[in-house]
Amino acid sequence: GAVVSQHPSWVICKSGTSVKIECRSLDFQATTMFWYRQFPKQSLMLMATSNEGSKATYEQGVEKDKFLINHASLTLSTLTVTSAHPEDSSFYICSARLDRGFYGYTFGSGTRLTVV
Amino acid sequence: GENVEQHPSTLSVQEGDSAVIKCTYSDSASNYFPWYKQELGKRPQLIIDIRSNVGEKKDQRIAVTLNKTAKHFSLHITETQPEDSAVYFCAPSLKGGTGKLIFGQGTTLQVKP
């Protein structure tokens, strides 16, 4: 149980276009979703925290107008990279917090974004 | 905010030896201390976690020890195997509030056969 499905697993897009990444909780309601970015050989860097029905909270240095996060339902959170540039190429991964009698987190499988 | 430091950044051991990775954090309010294993291109996998009311937890070859006074916790892997080779991350957090995980820099463990 507690599976987060993330799509697409990889995407190549042209510079200047937008890309949407979806994370869907399959068997639970994800009230809180976290979005991370991971560059090669680096750690996971938290980009933002999204709560269902409210605006996302962005970490310092993350452009909220470039990385649009929508968490309109308890089972779906999306990250849209707008006007993508080659430096946005990275591994993006979502994570939902679990609070169902035990505490922990479940991660999506990640999206490899390449901007050409 | 939480400042997390992880050491060492790389660790190479012979198969069968033990490996220890240490994580130091700054927020004394942190009360949840997980360790994740990440293989190349894949999602992090929880391998063990500990809560603040416990000093040590063991699961077969893996153990975690916590020193809340000194604000550090460590991952111990005994009888290492080649399949333990991966990047390991600590991510202390506060249950309640935002609950966000702030990851350490990671430790690349290489187990030589």
Image (cartoon, rainbow, N blue to C red):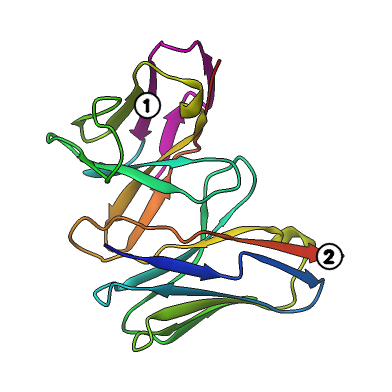
Residue linked to disc 2: B112
Viewport quadrant of the C terminus of chain B: bottom right
Q: Indicate the position of residue A7 as horizontal and vertical percent values.
A: 45, 26
**In which quarter of the view is residue A28 placed?**
top left
Chain ID of residue with mark 1: A
* Residue type, numbered disc 2: Lys
Q: Residue at x 78, y 65 (%)?
A: B111
Q: Residue at x 24, y 74 (%)?
A: B29
B7 in magenta: no
| Residue A115 in the image: above or below residue A58 | above
Q: Secondary structure at mark 1?
A: strand
* Residue type, numbered disc 1: Glu
Q: Residues within 10 Å of mark 1 (few under 14, many from 20)?
A: many
| Residue A68 in the image: above or below residue B108 | above
Q: Secondary structure at mark 2?
A: strand
Mark whose residue sits in front, 1 or 2: 2
Q: Indicate the position of residue A70 as horizontal and vertical percent values.
A: 23, 28
Residue A1 seen in the figure: no
**In which quarter of the view is residue B82 placed?**
bottom right
Q: Residues within 10 Å of mark 2 (few under 14, many from 20)?
A: some
Outermost residue, right side: B113
Residue B64 seen in the figure: yes
Residue linked to disc 1: A22
Question: Residue A95 vs residue A89: left or right?
Answer: left
Task: Give, as a single range, the part of the protein colored magenta.
Answer: A1-25
Tags 1 and 2 touching, CB below 8 Å: no
